Image (cartoon, rainbow, N blue to C red):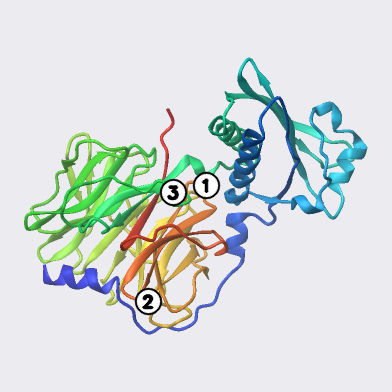
């Protein structure tokens, strides 16, 4: 127990470090060589109230802007009046949106109407490439004739636009995190923008290290039960929790799901050391992956190639990232051995890792880095005197949530994958260990 407790402190501590070289090519691979430049024409409403149209425009713009998948042309530099129907998009009008200063590659436009007490929105997405505009799609959306209905229709239209660019809106995801605002550490969840924060667990103990299955349906976490740390499993949207089978151990922690959701990876203290295990959730069978005389935690299987697992290990002294097969074979170190490296999290593409490392600016502090797993090239995203740790990817792969520790407290933040648009999401109590999860499809 002493070694394990010491290690839990060690991975939250800091040590001296040197400035690291970076590779912007990593960010180009993740966010693309150039964002799709999209203009959004103002929608007019026939018989639709000002409140509904204002809400529609606000939500549509916000969903697209937050996605990171498109670069929006500012309204102030684009034509004041846009097409309302496909027939309105003539070569001359398309050219006005295509040329500077608007310089859009795509145009979203349409109009709204009140029909039989319902809101009906006709929306189009057009490509402006070439002399003649081409239609990407044109669809009709129905909703309640209210600001809430307008917001729902706007989200559907935005989702179809983003799907055309191979992405999805952040409103289809939520962030789970640990908060002590009730006096106990519990698991909470919130919308991607920090709104609608609500408690998920009520263990009235120390409950932390949340993990969510890839389909967003199941939540696993570590909780102190009596004198032991156990892993519990429950529906992510709330429901009865159950303990999962694990070795006879006082410390079972850092759970994560296999990509298909059938197994849990975790760490358990056995023979004085925390080593790695898997648990088959169907038959309860345990399989030990590592036997090192070292503290090994945070096993994370690759979402595209589950036979590759990264984890944090102290087998070489200070914690570093290592990789192995799904059976615990072919162990090799991933990070350089300089400083301390912890909190690995795979990008959805299975090619990049986000992690926290002390090898960078503000020596002694953990900061968020991204690594190209194949080339081992890295780029640093966060800087400053505070500690930035526990980075996790949104399912879109264009955003990260992470925790910032400063002056004895921690808060959850989010940012784009290039380190821009850093945004604080929590403010009450101390909040940490975010996990970004997709909302299950109905």
Specify whether 392 is left or right of 235: right
**Of callouts 1 and 3, the N-terminal one:** 3
Tag 3, which secondary structure?
Answer: loop
Nearer-the-camera pick, 72 or 273: 72
Residue at image mark 2: 337
Image location (x, y in percent) of residue 396 = 52, 47
Q: Label 2, label 1: how many angstroms apart (C-alpha)?
A: 31 Å
| Mark count | 3
**Quarter of the picture holding the C terminus:** top left
Q: Residue at x 78, y 46 (%)?
A: 105
Specify whether 297 is left or right of 347: left
Residue 31 found in image quarter? bottom right
Camera-side mark, 2 or 1? 1
Residue 438 to residue 322: above or below:
above
Camera-side mark, 3 or 2? 3
Nearer-the-camera pick, 55 or 121: 55
Q: Residue at x 47, y 67 (%)?
A: 369
Residue at image mark 1: 396
Residue 50 found in image quarter? top right
Residue at image mark 3: 195
Image location (x, y in percent) of residue 229 = 14, 56
Camera-side mark, 1 or 3? 3
Image location (x, y in percent) of residue 256 = 30, 50
Q: Residue at x 61, y 37 (%)?
A: 163
Specify whether 34 is left or right of 399: right
């Amino acid at each position: 127990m002493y070694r394990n407790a010491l290690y839990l402190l060690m991975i939250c501590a800091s040590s001296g470090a040197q400035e690291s070289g970076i590779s912007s090519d990593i960010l180009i691979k993740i966010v693309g060589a150039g964002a799709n430049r999209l203009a959004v024409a103002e929608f007019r409403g026939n018989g639709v109230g000002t409140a509904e149209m204002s809400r529609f425009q606000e939500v549509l713009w916000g969903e697209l802007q937050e996605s990171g998948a498109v670069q929006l042309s500012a309204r102030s530099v684009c034509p004041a009046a846009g097409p309302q129907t496909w027939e309105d998009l003539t070569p001359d009008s398309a050219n006005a949106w295509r040329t500077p200063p608007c310089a859009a590659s795509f145009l979203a436009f349409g109009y709204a109407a009140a029909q039989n007490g319902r809101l009906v929105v006709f929306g189009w997405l057009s490509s402006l490439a070439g002399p003649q505009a081409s239609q990407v799609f044109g669809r009709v959306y129905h909703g309640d004739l209210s600001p809430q209905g307008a917001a729902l229709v706007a989200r559907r239209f935005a989702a179809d636009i983003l799907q055309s660019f191979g992405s999805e809106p952040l409103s289809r995801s939520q962030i789970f995190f640990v908060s002590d605002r009730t006096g106990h550490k519990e698991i909470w969840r919130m919308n991607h923008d920090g709104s609608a924060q609500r408690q998920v667990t009520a263990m009235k103990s120390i409950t932390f290290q949340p993990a969510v299955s890839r389909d967003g349906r199941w939540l696993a976490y570590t909780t102190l039960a009596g004198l032991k740390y156990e892993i519990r499993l429950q529906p992510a949207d709330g429901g009865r929790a159950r303990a999962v089978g694990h070795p006879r151990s006082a410390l079972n922690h850092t759970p994560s799901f296999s990509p298909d959701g059938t197994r849990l990876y975790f760490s358990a203290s056995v023979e004085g050391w925390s080593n790695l295990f898997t648990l088959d959730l169907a038959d309860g069978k345990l399989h030990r992956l590592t036997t090192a005389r070292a503290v090994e935690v945070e096993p994370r299987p690759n979402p595209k190639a589950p036979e590759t697992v990264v984890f944090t290990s102290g087998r070489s002294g200070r914690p570093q990232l290592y990789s192995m097969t799904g059976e615990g074979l072919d162990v090799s170190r991933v990070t350089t051995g300089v400083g301390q490296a912890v909190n690995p999290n795979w990008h959805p593409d299975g090619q990049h890792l986000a992690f926290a490392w002390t090898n960078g600016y503000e020596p002694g502090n953990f900061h968020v880095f991204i690594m190209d797993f194949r080339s081992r090239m890295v780029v640093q995203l966060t800087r400053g005197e505070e500690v930035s740790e526990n980075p996790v990817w949104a399912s879109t792969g264009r955003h990260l949530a992470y925790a910032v520790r400063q002056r004895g407290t921690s808060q959850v933040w989010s940012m784009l994958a290039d380190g821009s648009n850093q945004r604080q999401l929590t403010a009450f109590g101390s909040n940490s260990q975010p996990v970004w999860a997709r909302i299950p499809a109905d």
